[in-house]
Image (spheres, rainbow, N blue to C red):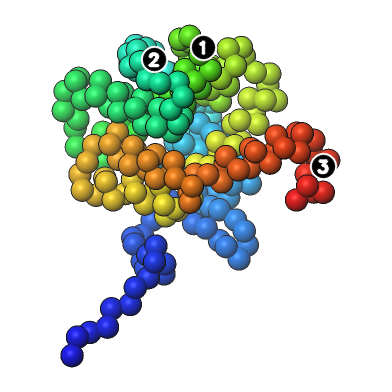
């Protein structure tokens, strides 16, 4: 007699792995990264410190900044991106940008396959991803090349790429908080896809692309898009949000 196999769509209730990085406390509606709640990270730190915490398991020294933008490589990525159709989906354009960046990294020689080397590469890649998002936005809008400024904050640089001018302090802080809130959410579909690719010993950039491809779909990444539609639809008036909902 054949054994009955229970089908669990979407791997529901299936243990896929363990992580010490992030904990979702659904009962308390809280997210913790290495024991720090998102509320504490937002109140006391910035995204750059949070990114370091996620990769190293401890907070960096005070005043820590992510590596500057890799302007030379980003310029090469822009050359590739500028040949793509502006009407393509922005997430598809980001996939192309990431692939181009990974190819330039490959051309520098084989990566050192150690945990510390992977951490360094991931920390170096982190700001480049945001800048590539900014370059995609510029391409879609028909704007020209603009490099992130050395020594500027990560969130500030992203908004500058989007707008072509520097945001004020409040706007940059809002962007920084948004980045903290999206840093790490345990085993969501995108991070799970990254883990599958990485566990097959794919390279860092291909693994990130795997997660980005999943994020493009309407079941995972579309939530952000729908929220933005709501904000625009209700006119950007904070006092009108409750009534709208």
Q: Which residue corresponds to the image point at 62% horizontal and 58% vertical from the top-left?
A: 29
Q: Residues within 10 Å of mark 1 (few under 14, many from 20)?
A: some
Earlier-in-chain disc, 3 versus 2: 2
Choose mark 3 or mark 2, whichever is in front. 2
Can residue 70 be seen here? The reply is no
Pick the front one: 49 or 30: 30
Residue that carries the numbered disc 3 in the rendered image: 240
Q: Which residue corresponds to the image point at 83% horizontal and 40% vertical from the top-left?
A: 239
Expressed as whole percent of the image width and height from the top left, the position of residue 122 reads 34, 33
Would residue 172 be found to the left or right of residue 146 on screen?
Answer: right
At numbered mark 2, what does the secondary structure look like: helix, strand or loop?
loop
| Tag 3 near tag 2, CB within 8 Å | no
Would residue 117 be found to the left or right of residue 137 on screen?
Answer: left
Rounded to the nearest angstrom, the CA distance separating label 3 from label 1 is: 33 Å
Instruction: Look at the image and tell me in which quarter the N terminus lies.
Output: bottom left
Residue that carries the numbered disc 1 in the rendered image: 143
Expressed as whole percent of the image width and height from the top left, the position of residue 219 reads 48, 51
Can residue 83 be seen here? The reply is yes
Would residue 1 be found to the left or right of residue 227 on screen?
Answer: left
Q: Which residue corresponds to the image point at 80% horizontal and 35% vertical from the top-left?
A: 237
Earlier-in-chain disc, 1 versus 2: 2
In the picture, residue 28 is in which quadrant? bottom right
């Amino acid at each position: 007699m054949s054994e009955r196999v229970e089908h669990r769509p979407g791997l529901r209730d299936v243990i896929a792995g363990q992580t010490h990085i992030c904990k979702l406390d659904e009962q308390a509606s809280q997210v913790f990264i290495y024991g720090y709640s998102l509320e504490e990270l937002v109140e006391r730190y910035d995204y750059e410190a949070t990114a370091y915490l996620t990769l190293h398991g401890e907070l960096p020294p005070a005043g820590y900044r992510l590596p500057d933008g890799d302007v030379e490589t980003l310029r090469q990525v822009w050359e590739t991106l500028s040949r793509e159709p502006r009407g393509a989906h922005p997430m598809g354009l980001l996939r192309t940008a990431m692939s181009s960046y990974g190819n330039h990294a490959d051309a520098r020689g084989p990566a050192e396959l150690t945990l510390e080397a992977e951490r360094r590469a991931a920390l170096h890649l982190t700001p480049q991803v945001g800048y590539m998002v900014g370059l995609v936005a510029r391409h879609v809008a028909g704007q020209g090349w603009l490099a992130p400024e050395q020594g500027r904050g990560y969130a500030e640089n992203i908004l500058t790429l989007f707008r072509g001018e520097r945001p004020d302090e409040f706007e940059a802080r809002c962007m920084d908080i948004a980045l903290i809130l999206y840093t790490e959410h345990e085993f969501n579909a995108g991070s799970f896809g990254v883990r599958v690719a990485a566990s097959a010993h794919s390279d860092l950039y291909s693994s990130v692309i795997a997660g980005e491809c999943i994020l493009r779909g309407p079941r995972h990444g579309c939530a952000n898009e729908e929220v933005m539609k709501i904000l625009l639809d209700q006119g950007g008036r904070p006092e009108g949000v409750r009534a709208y909902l």
